[in-house]
Amino acid sequence: MTDTPTTQSIPQVELAFKPTPLQYFPRLREAWGGPHIWVKRDDLTGFGLSGNKVRKLEFHMAAAMESGCDTVITCGPYQSNHCRATALAGARFGLDVRLVLRTPDGNEPNVSVANLRIDTLAGAEIVYISEAQWPDRDEIMAAEEAELAEQGHKSWVIPQGGSDKLGMWGMSLGFREFVGQIPDVIGADVAAMYHTGSSGGTTSGFGWGADRTGFDNPVVALCISEPAENLIERVDRIWKAGVETFGGDIPQPNLHYVDDYLCGGYGRVTEELVETMVEATRLTGLLFDTTYTGKSMYGVKNEIRKGRFGPDDHIVFWHTGGGFGAVN
């Protein structure tokens, strides 16, 4: 099935370097056994403006400017990749950015975090909220929007992770890009594609793209923060909003959710996770962070160790960026 809108019919700005490479890393296979392992390099969408979040922001920033907004508001944990990318995108287009950032107690963290330093460097205004306030983040952003309106500003509010129908659309185009690379780059069937699952925008976009391109092999979301049912609910909600806007039917991709590698929840780590992250860097020369890509790569390693794939299989890990988190 094809989507109703064309790429040209939805406002979009250019932020990411695309297509991102699809690269083979033989030393991972040598160390871990099992299948051939490829990496979709969305860590190369840019430098500061890096990671998969940039694909979503191309549509959010375009919508903000087309709507006549002068400010963008979004939210996330204080080490958020999405918030860092939003701050830099706002600087590029001359939009003010207000970030609602979660810390344990609602105060400025007393640790040095690369993404947070970049937020400040890019000129973003930061509002800190506590973990107890986090469930009310949408209402808090609405209050910030109202305050700015009283000051004569018009704001565009982006949900956590850019995860809504616009973010989904951006990631679905990324999936189409990936599918188009498979014949010439891999030249074989892809047994499974693994990615980090959290706020739902990436997973919903991949599911939408898989359904619309006819990619029927497993697309696997490795949950890094919460049980799978939470991610499933968010993805379903985004799909429904997408159908209302873009048309077509609710996607029915071969989408799997795995929450066996939460390691205690968002931002939590275990010794084995850190060891895997370091090992993966030393086998590939790529950077991973303990919150997102390191945790999902830890999941990939364990999925391989469970014997899910044979030596002739090819699997893909979608690197969503977050390299700044490796140096916190």
Image (cartoon, helix red, strand yellow):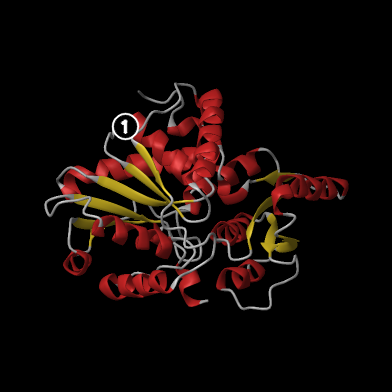
Q: Is residue 112 above or below residue 293?
A: below
Q: Nearer the viewer, residue 24 or 55?
A: 24
Residue 298 lies in what quarter of the image? bottom left
Residue located farthest toward the right when viewing the structure as drawn: 150
Tell me residue 185's x, y (percent).
19, 50
Residue located farthest toward the left when viewing the structure as drawn: 312
Q: Residues within 10 Å of mark 1 (few under 14, many from 20)?
A: some
Residue with the mark numbered 1: 213
Q: Amino acid at mark 1?
A: Thr
Q: Nearer the viewer, residue 127 or 301?
A: 301
Residue name at image x 36 percent, y 58 percent: 299
Tell me residue 216's x, y (percent).
28, 34
Q: Is residue 11 visible?
A: no
Q: Is residue 86 above or below residue 66?
A: below
Residue name at image x 31 percent, y 74 percent: 279
Q: How many marks?
A: 1
Could you say whether the residue bearing mark 1 is in a helix, strand or loop?
A: helix
Tell me residue 315's x, y (percent).
24, 51
Left/right placement of residue 280 relative to residue 320 reads left
Residue name at image x 42 percent, y 58 percent: 261
